[in-house]
């Protein structure tokens, strides 16, 4: 954004002679014409443009809104394109045959174009009185939010000023009611309205504040960040499935390490992973924080290289140290290693299935990655080839290398497996007959076959 445009924005705001964040819904918005902003339709999803134009042609207002507008103004390529309109969800469904209505708390229209989904929301009004059944009276959390309103009301009920910007498909202008353009220029992520009240309405906003501030490199002003330190407990009332989706965004957005540190700074990490957080407070020789740090560094590196990251691997890393602690305690009570690992994996997963709803499709691979760690340490004889052919071998091998990178005592086993994968069948036979490589010594007297993790 050019310096001249910024100066012009400030002069327009000053002319209002009011506080932009006082929720004065009679104030006029700032409207930036097409000639004075950098948003181009060539950077907008063709599917989103189809929806915008179709709504406009049907006589409805249609705006690109939220993170898509924010990112385009910052010169970033958005991942999602959300649309706001004055058409009701039912009318949207009549216009688009490829539309599905979803949600109870927020009634939304999802319009499908192959695998791409364009989310369309009807303009909403602020919540009604606290006595209304839309809102819990005890903690202020909004239960339902299907009170429709005007575009202006919709802007003021959004979370952050940077997400309350609208791109008008009718004349290609950008509309700003809340001062979001100035906050973008200043690098600030400001919450609209009274911060504590807004966090109580939807506690997930605290996680969004952390994620977006890290992603954008923005500051959280004092009034926005101060309540976060004391309101983390409100996350305990959020539906687990919703928390799970937010956790994926937190750690798979390309800035997992910074996000992790920020979550700990604001005392939020413990409400997502309590056991891990407890162990972080009593580190021993750099563990477990050093292990988690390395895991997040590797995750960010893979994503920066355009590689995929399996969420099961991330969750397995986050819960690895609690698993080790529980397994150690069980073995001290006389339980054999395999049984201790099985029992520990169930115990460490159970609370996280309840609080963040880790689904079975990730829980099973997590257990397999964990259980294969002991089998990777016993690399001799025919069982080595069986481990190599295991569907989860590659993930378990990467996990073993991660442990070595973080300083765990796994000897040279990781290097041995690296060489073993590059060998021919004849070379593998010779390597298996030459004995076990130098590594962590383990007793072979009680070897047992690892049970299937599918039962």
Image: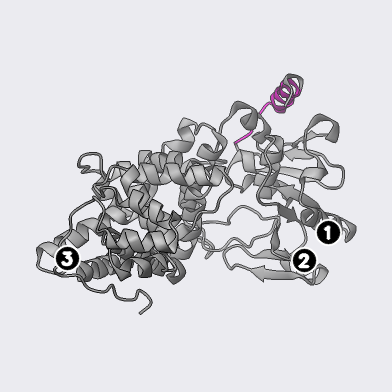
> Can residue 14 be found in the magenta stretch?
yes
Alpha carbon distance from label 2 to label 3: 66 Å
Numbered range of the magenta stretch? 5-21
The residue carrying mark 2 is: 92
Could you say where residue 337 lies in the image, as x and y percent from the top left?
Answer: 19, 66
> Residue 443 or 99: which is nearer the viewer?
443
On the image, which quarter does residue 344 sit in? bottom left
> Can residue 354 be found in the magenta stretch?
no
Residue 55, label in figure: 1
The residue carrying mark 3 is: 444
Query: Dots 2 and 3: beta carbons under 8 Å?
Result: no
In this view, the mark in front (2 or 3)? 3
| Depicted 133 relative to depicted 17: above or below | below
| Depicted 37 relative to depicted 322: above or below | above
Query: Dots 2 and 1: beta carbons under 8 Å?
Result: yes
Asked whether the viewer can see residue 24, the reply is: yes
Name the side, left or right, on which 301 lies relative to 9.
left
> Residue 124 or 361: which is nearer the viewer?
361
Alpha carbon distance from label 3 to label 1: 70 Å
- N-terminal-most mark, 3 or 1: 1
Q: Which residue is drawn at 60% across and 36% down?
A: 21
């Amino acid at each position: 954004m050019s310096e001249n445009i910024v100066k012009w924005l400030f002069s327009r705001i000053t002319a209002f002679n009011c506080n932009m964040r006082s929720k004065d819904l009679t104030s006029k918005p700032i409207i930036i014409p097409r000639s004075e902003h950098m948003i181009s339709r060539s950077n907008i999803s063709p599917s989103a443009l189809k929806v915008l134009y179709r709504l406009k042609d049907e006589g409805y207002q249609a705006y690109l809104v939220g993170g898509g507008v924010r990112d385009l103004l910052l010169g970033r390529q958005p991942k999602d394109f959300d649309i706001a309109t004055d058409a009701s969800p039912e009318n949207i469904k009549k216009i688009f045959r490829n539309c599905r209505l979803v949600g109870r708390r927020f009634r939304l229209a999802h319009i499908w174009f192959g695998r791409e989904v364009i989310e369309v929301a009807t303009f909403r009004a602020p919540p009604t009185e606290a006595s209304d059944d839309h809102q819990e009276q005890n903690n202020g959390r909004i239960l339902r939010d299907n009170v429709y309103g005007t575009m202006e009301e919709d802007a003021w009920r959004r979370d952050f000023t940077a997400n309350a910007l609208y791109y008008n498909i009718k004349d290609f202008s950008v509309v700003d009611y809340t001062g979001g353009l100035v906050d973008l220029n200043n690098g600030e992520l400001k919450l609209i309205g009274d911060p504590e009240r807004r966090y109580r309405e939807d506690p997930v906003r605290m996680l969004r504040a952390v994620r977006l501030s890290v992603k954008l490199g923005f500051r959280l002003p004092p009034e926005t960040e101060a309540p976060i330190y004391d309101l983390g407990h409100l996350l305990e009332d959020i539906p687990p499935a919703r928390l799970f989706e937010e956790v994926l965004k937190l750690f798979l957005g390309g800035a997992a390490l910074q996000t992790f540190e920020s979550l700990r700074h604001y005392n939020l990490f413990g409400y997502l992973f309590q056991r891990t957080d407890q162990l972080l407070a009593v580190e021993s020789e750099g563990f477990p924080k050093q292990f988690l740090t390395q895991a997040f560094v590797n995750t960010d590196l893979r994503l920066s290289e355009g590689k995929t990251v399996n969420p099961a691997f991330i969750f397995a890393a986050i819960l690895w140290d609690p698993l080790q602690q529980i397994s150690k305690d069980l073995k001290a009570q006389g339980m054999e290693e395999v049984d201790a690992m099985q029992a520990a994996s169930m115990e460490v997963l159970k609370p996280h299935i309840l609080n963040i709803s880790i689904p079975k499709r990730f829980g099973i691979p997590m257990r397999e990655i964990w259980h294969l760690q002991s089998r990777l340490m016993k690399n001799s004889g025919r069982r080595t080839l069986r481990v190599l052919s295991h569907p989860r071998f590659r993930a378990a091998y990467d996990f073993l290398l991660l442990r070595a990178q973080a300083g765990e005592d796994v000897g040279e086993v990781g290097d041995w497996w690296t060489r073993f994968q590059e060998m021919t069948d004849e070379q593998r036979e010779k390597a298996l007959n030459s004995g076990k490589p130098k590594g962590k010594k383990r007793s072979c007297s009680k070897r047992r076959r690892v049970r299937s993790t599918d039962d």
